[in-house]
Structure formats: structure tokens, C-alpha cells
Amino acid sequence: MNTIELNILLPALIAGLLVLATHIPFGMKVLERGVIFADLAIAQIAGLGIVIAALLDLTEQPLLVQLIAAASALCGAVLLALIEHFLSEIKEACIGMTFVLTASGGILLMSHDVHAGEHLKDLLVGQILWVSTNQLIATALLTTALLALWQWSNLKTYNLGFYALFALAVTASVQLVGVYLVFASLIIPALATYRISYRRTHYAFAVGITGYAIGLMLSAWFDLPSGAAVVWAMAGTGILAAWLLNCIL
């Protein structure tokens, strides 16, 4: 691996670590609450905000784009909290429909955009290899604040508080790595370790970090799309880890 590849892969790996920092604890909570599609729904709603900002020609104002995406995601958080409160028996189906409707809405909005295919690919698969230093710094600051609130506040015990924190985390991460990797980072490490009680978080981080590292290296060696490569690498790592942990522990 040459110096140029390392200079590209190292920021990408840091981006992955920042995503995992919030998504692993969130993922465990998502499995516990039984709202698996919440991540996809919130990510898609945040993405819809980004699409709207692009249609309004605001792409040259990144702060405003971030605010629109965050506001969209927080509106989604309110909607999901209401669904869980009033429609708890069918919440997963309702959240899934929210995802489908939002994704379809984004496609409709982009239907007259000549660059729609490129925008959609960036939203779903992400551009993890091209994250900037400013993006990493801003995400690191937001991650620190979210983890502090997660650890030392009672927000996560309330429906709206949980979804609000969740929405802000997803808004930042979907712009770094895309919808698919956001979902993989949330679910795969938590799912691979869901039967483990002893040091579960440590094992989950090991799965996530290994998946990102292997996927990024494979994408560099074989010229593969990085986001898709990391998703598959993390899935393979998660399956192997789940088997080994069940055999050992």
C-alpha cells in the first residue's frame, strides 16, 4: 500500500470510527427497542433534507445544508416518537413505510435533475474516501457532545429524547458514509454480539473496526466501491465473530 492510498484510507477509517462511536451504543438500543428500520428512516429523512437543499441551490453554503438536514431529521425523530407512542403494536411496519415514502419522495424531487443518479449514489453509498478534514473535525465535535448526552443525561430514556439524539447522529454520519454504511454500522456489530453480556461493547467495536479496515483495504487493492466493500466486510466479520463468540463464551 503506497503513501497516496494511505493518505486516502486513513481519513476514511477515522470517519468510520466516528460513526461507530455513536452507532454501536445506538444500535444496541435499537435492537432492544425493536425499531430496526428507524435508522434507515431517519437517514433517508436527513437525506431528503439534503436533496431539498440541493434543489434550492444551497450546496455552496454547507452550514445551511447541515441545518436543513438536521431539521429534517429532527422532524423525523418527532414522527418516529409519535409512531412508537401511539402505534406501538405496528411501529416497525409504520417506520418501514416512512422509509419507503421518504426514499420515493427523494426520487420524485430529483426526477428532473440531470445529476440525480450521482446524487442518489452519493446518498446511499456515500463518499467515505473523500471526507475532508473539516468534516472530520465537525463530526468529532458533534460525536463528543452526543456521547456526553448519551452517557450523562436521561434523554435516551424518553422516546423523543432517544430519537432526537439518534437523528443528530445519523444526520452527520449519512453525509460521511452514506445510508447503507450507516445502517450496517448500527446493526451489524450490535447483532453480532446480541447474545453477549460480558464486554459486549468491546466485541462490537472490534467487529465494526475490523469491518471498516478490511473493507477499505479491499476497496483499495481491487478498485471496488468503498462503501459497498465495507458493508460486506463488516457483515462477514460479524458472522464470524458471532460464531466464535457463541463457541467460546
Image (cartoon, rainbow, N blue to C red):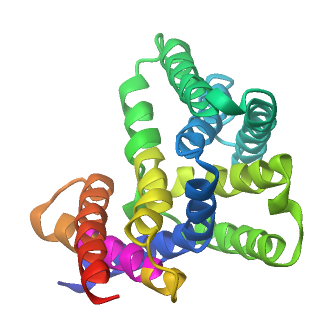
Residue 12 position within the rendered picture, expressed as x and y whole percent measured from the top left:
41, 70
Residue 139, compared with residue 176, is above or below; it is below
Image quarter hosting the N terminus? bottom left
Residue 177 in view here: no
Specify the segment rendered in magenta: 204-215
Q: Is residue 183 left or right of residue 229?
A: right
Residue 192 position within the rendered picture, expressed as x and y whole percent measured from the top left:
37, 68
Residue 219 position within the rendered picture, expressed as x and y whole percent measured from the top left:
20, 64
Q: Is residue 131 left or right of residue 147?
A: left
Q: Residue at x 40, y 61 (%)?
A: 188
Residue 73, compared with residue 174, is above or below; it is above
Front residue of this view, candidates 161 and 87: 87
Front residue of this view, candidates 219 and 205: 205
Prevailing secondary structure of the magenta residues: helix
Front residue of this view, candidates 69 and 79: 79
Magenta stretch holds residue 189 = no
Residue 188 in view here: yes
Q: Quadrant of residue 213?
A: bottom left
Q: Is residue 62 left or right of residue 3?
A: right
Image quarter hosting the C terminus? bottom left
Q: Quadrant of residue 91?
A: top right
Q: Residue at x 35, y 71 (%)?
A: 212
Residue 229, compared with residue 146, is above or below; it is above
